[in-house]
Image: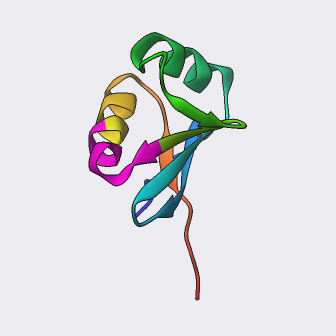
Amino acid sequence: MPIKSDLPVDVEIVGGGTVFMFMLQTSAARRWVDEFVSPYRQMWGDGLVVEWRYAAGLVQAMRRGGLVVTREEVSS
């Protein structure tokens, strides 16, 4: 469930299953990734490709770092 905030969204998580895309929406998010994520990371455009097993820990670290992270709602 996404967290409601009046702050701009820094990272929007898209997808699920085995791979998540962390779409970096702000320069603050891009700076955070440059500083804290391995230089060998997989990027696809403005999206950081993250295996499912690392997604929850990355969300926690990003939020502790002051970023606003939300999950795209998928409707059927």
Front-most of residues 33 and 70: 33
Q: Percent x, y for residue 18?
A: 39, 60
Left or right of 25 in this view: 20: left
Task: Determine whether 39 is above or below 75 in the image.
Answer: above
Magenta span: 50-57
Q: Percent x, y for residue 73?
A: 55, 69
Furthest residue in direction bottom, as rendered: 76
Q: Would residue 4 be seen by someone viewing this image from the given angle?
A: no
Left or right of 13 in this view: 44: right
Assign the N terminus to one quadrant of the image.
bottom left
Front-most of residues 50 and 59: 50
Q: Quadrant of residue 28?
A: top right
Q: Percent x, y for residue 55?
A: 35, 46
Q: Residue at x 49, y 15 (%)?
A: 39
Left or right of 25 in this view: 53: left
Assign the magenta stretch its main secondary structure: helix
Q: Residue at x 34, y 36 (%)?
A: 58
Assign the C terminus to one quadrant of the image.
bottom right
Q: Residue at x 49, y 18 (%)?
A: 32
Front-most of residues 21 and 59: 21
Q: What is the basis of the colouring in this image? A: rainbow
Q: Quadrant of residue 31?
A: top right
Q: Would residue 56 be seen by someone viewing this image from the given angle?
A: yes
Front-most of residues 15 and 27: 15
Residue 53 on the magenta span: yes
Q: Residue at x 31, y 30 (%)?
A: 61
Q: Quadrant of residue 62?
A: top left
Residue 43 on the magenta span: no
